Image (tube, rainbow, N blue to C red):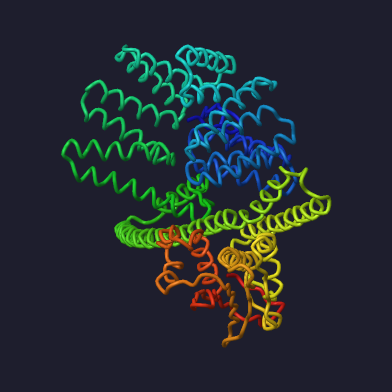
Amino acid sequence: MLMCSAGSFGQLKHIRELQHSLTTIKDSLAYTDVLNELADYNHYRHWDSVLHYAELAQGIAERHEYQRGIAGALTGKGVYYMTRNNYLSSRFNNDALRMYRKLGDSMRVALLLNNIAINFIFDGNYTKCVTHLYEADRVSRLAKQDTVRTIALLNLIDIDTTLSKRQRDSMLITARSIAERLKDEVMLSVCHQLEAMRLYDAGSKEEGLARMHEILKEAEAEGNYSNMAYIYNDIGQMILQMGGDTTHAIEYFTEGLAIAQRQHFFYIASLLMPQLASLYEKTGNPAKAYYYAQLQLDQAATQAAELQASGFTYLDYLNNERNLREAQARQSAQKRTIYLLILLTIVTAGLLFFLYRSEIASRNMARAQQQLRRETEARNRELEDWDQFHNMLISVMAHDLRAPFASILSITEAFKVIDLLSPEVIKTMMGSLQKTSEDSIRFMEGLLSWIASKCKAGKYQAEVFMMADVVRESNLFFTQAQEDKNVWLELDESLEKEAVFAEKNMLGFICRNILHNATKYAAAGKPITVRAFSEGNSVITAVTNHGKEMTEAEIRKIFQPEQAVMAKKEGLKGAGIAMIISQDMVQRMQGRIWAESEPGVGTTFYFSLPKAVSAEKTVAV
């Protein structure tokens, strides 16, 4: 995977020239551009220097409101964090992309599209990665300079599995011709690597391996440590695949890892460590295998700590060099008679520092694991909450949409014999159809409001409601069915005085569910009675229908999951999941629900909810 900043050239000589030019530049904007260019070049040599120069450039550019300088610094930071904190890298890359689009810089837009494609690789989203690479290729071709196109093409060769051999060869030829025209040694080296691998895969293994050794020397001469680390890995893999000496392959892997660790190329290091651990285990050297396995764990712990701190930590490469020279000068000025003391002091301090760092690393890892566990548990609870909400939502829709649609179907069925209907009857039916439709719309609006509040706040909000108002509104769904059956709703005076503290949509669902069953099983010519009374800090609402009574066993099963079986029994058809959902909703609102049945009287469903204490108060349920 090839990442890029503002350029792809990696010559050490040019880096030194840029560093020297910093001492002579007086213009702040030009100084910012050179810092960004140094960040660009160093991502092939020393990873931490990328962040060092990008941070310096961003600070100066922001003080002068230099947009191009800020975008360049964000690009460098996006590259630096790509193997440490992919989320942070994506954020910097996308911010830079927006700025370059406003500036109309097509070449750098293509560059950022390529880098964002690599972000998608680390997220495992290969489809979006390939899409962004083709977009980078398209934009680069339209730009004045097609510098970035080489990188996009080489990444497509490696990542797009739908390409044929002919298409890959064509892309490789195009990429190489661009790199040769621009004298881009880094991209030429990558092209040569791909050509060597193609020779090897085609059967010319010795020739491919020899060519890879030549490319390694070229990368070493250019000081391109990034390519060197990858080439050492490729050569080691070739030796193993050819059945060569495992010890010889280990030497190449070890050298590649040494470069990756020295230059802080964490990604290639993470590829080499497990390979070395596996090879040493196979060759019967468990101590070495354990050593490299531990290195991998230490690197993972370091990256976890950086991730927790948002990745804003780095080594100041230039300051380290200066401090080292000053320390050497001080040591050379000291007397020979105290060398032994200094040596003992350094060794003691080193041991203490090692022990201290080991202890700190262990504690940090434990804290990171504990934090990760807490976050995982919180996320699981959140997912469970959403799953319950979705189940409720589906049940509410399946249950409460049935009544109005049944009413509408009943009315439309009557229109099949419209010739037999009088104008008065038709007018009455149309009024009923309009009323049912309006009630359905109000229900859908309430349902959408419930969904919106859940998405916005993540919790249910309880408020104060008069029970009589809620019952009347809930019964609008069943007036037609009640008229057809010659039953009616009768509200006791006690209901008008009682107010409850509840969530509106859940309370409405509970009332509609109980009223639906009461209408369905009520005896013709008798009312459905609703009354309320206080009990401690709760309001109990009772809904009585004068239909068929239920046994104690049947009542118990209504509020149990296996109650679906009894729904098949005569007189209980329709008792489904809605009552289980109602019970769950009541419990969420700190209440309870139950039923009682008496021969000759019918069945009464009760549910209790907290009393309303203040009309201004809202709480999360």
Residue 464 in view, yes or no: no
User: Of all residues shown, which one is farthest toward the bottom?
Assistant: 536
Task: Give how far across and how far down residue 360 sits, in percent.
Answer: 38, 62
- Judge by depth and name the residue closer to the eye, 305 or 121: 121
- Judge by depth and name the residue closer to the eye, 378 or 305: 378
- Judge by depth and name the residue closer to the eye, 502 or 117: 502
Residue 327 in view, yes or no: yes
Residue 269, located in which quarter of the rendered image? top left
Q: Is residue 284 above or below residue 516?
A: above
Task: Give how far across and how far down residue 8 sits, in percent.
Answer: 56, 27
Q: Is residue 84 above or below residue 574?
A: above
Badge count = 0
User: Of all residues shown, which one is farthest toward the right?
Assistant: 423
Q: Quadrant of the C terminus?
A: bottom right
At 71% from the left and 34% from the top, the residue drawn is 101
Q: Is residue 411 above or below residue 499?
A: above
User: Of all residues shown, which one is farthest toward the front?
Assistant: 420
Q: Is residue 608 above or below residue 157?
A: below
Residue 438, located in which quarter of the rendered image? bottom right
Residue 372, located in which quarter of the rendered image? bottom left
Q: Is residue 380 found left or right of 347 in the rendered image?
A: right
At 47% from the left and 41% from the top, the residue drawn is 83
Task: Give how far across and how far down residue 50 sits, in percent.
Answer: 54, 40
- Judge by depth and name the residue closer to the eye, 435 or 188: 435
Task: Give how far across and how far down residue 612 sits, in percent.
Answer: 66, 80
